Image: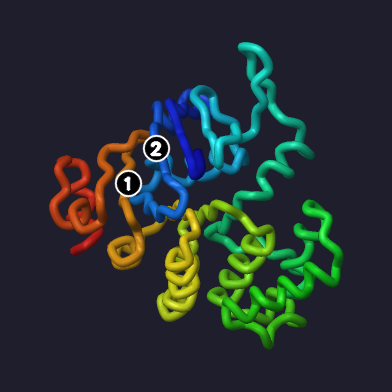
Amino acid sequence: MSGVQIQGVRKSFGDTEVLRGVDLDVPHGEVVCLIGPSGSGKSTLLRCINHLERIDAGSILVDGERVGYRRKGDRLYELSPVEAAKRRAGIGMVFQRFHLFPHMTVLENIIEAPVGVRGLSVAAATTRARALLERVGLTEKERAYPAELSGGQQQRIAIARALAMDPTLMLFDEPTSALDPELVGEVLAVMRDLAGEGMTMLVVTHEMNFAREVANRVVFMDQGEIVESDEPGRLLTAPTHARTRAFLARTLH
């Protein structure tokens, strides 16, 4: 079964339970936008899907493979960092901050993981990187360093870098929230194109218009739980839960 299956996922930091038994299925090719107040567990859920955070209970499967763990008999064993990195290679993640290597050129940033993790030749990785730079509209920037780029350009490079690993799933953690308003559109345009091509995507966002236009489903989270999940046309205009209505009243007006 392809896509993402999340069952009963719990995660605590100290005494604070951040995820309280989250269940969510994202079929292959579906775009799901996660919305909700700060501290509701949205970003933590994405980080757990990518095994950047260990879960305390439950399970996460991506394309049928358990994330971060191997089952042996009736016990689970955490994968070694090398094994986890290999399994994570099929999951692209774009963060709020761009996390580009400042001492590397744009081209070097994009080819680093395909060469180091996937074992591609530099020539093959460079050819792929140039195709991705064309896709995100930044062909002329391959020799530039991150500090020479605008925030929107850096985020588009971060998307290209994630795509260079040929992921089956893309995770976006508030990818436009650190950008000046006039730069948001260029990043969302790249994400729209990805969605149109059938990429499976989980997007934490405050961009309600993007969610309305692109998502197959919008999921509202609050206090570590999924409160409501529905098509964007219904959830954003006629939510059934009072917590969702209160959140949208603050957000949309």
Measure how far apart labels 2 and 1 are at the Cα level.
Answer: 9 Å
**Horizontal relation, residue 146 to residue 169: left or right:** right
Residue sitting at 55 percent across and 40 percent down? 62
Q: Nearer the viewer, residue 246 or 69?
A: 69
Q: Is residue 64 visible?
A: yes
Type of the residue with mark 2 = Leu
Which mark, by number, is residue 219?
1
- Whole-percent x, y for residue 41 in the image: 42, 40
Toward the viewer: 11 or 21? 21
SS assignment at label 2: strand
**Residue 50 pos. (x, y %):** 59, 43
Q: Residue at x 49, y 44 (%)?
A: 3
Could you tell me the amino acid type at mark 1? Answer: Val
Q: Residue furthest front?
A: 1
Q: Quadrant of the C terminus?
A: bottom left
Give the labeled residue for mark 2.
24
Q: Quadrant of residue 55?
A: top right
Dot placed on the residue nearer the N-terminal end, 2 or 1: 2
Q: Secondary structure at mark 1?
A: strand
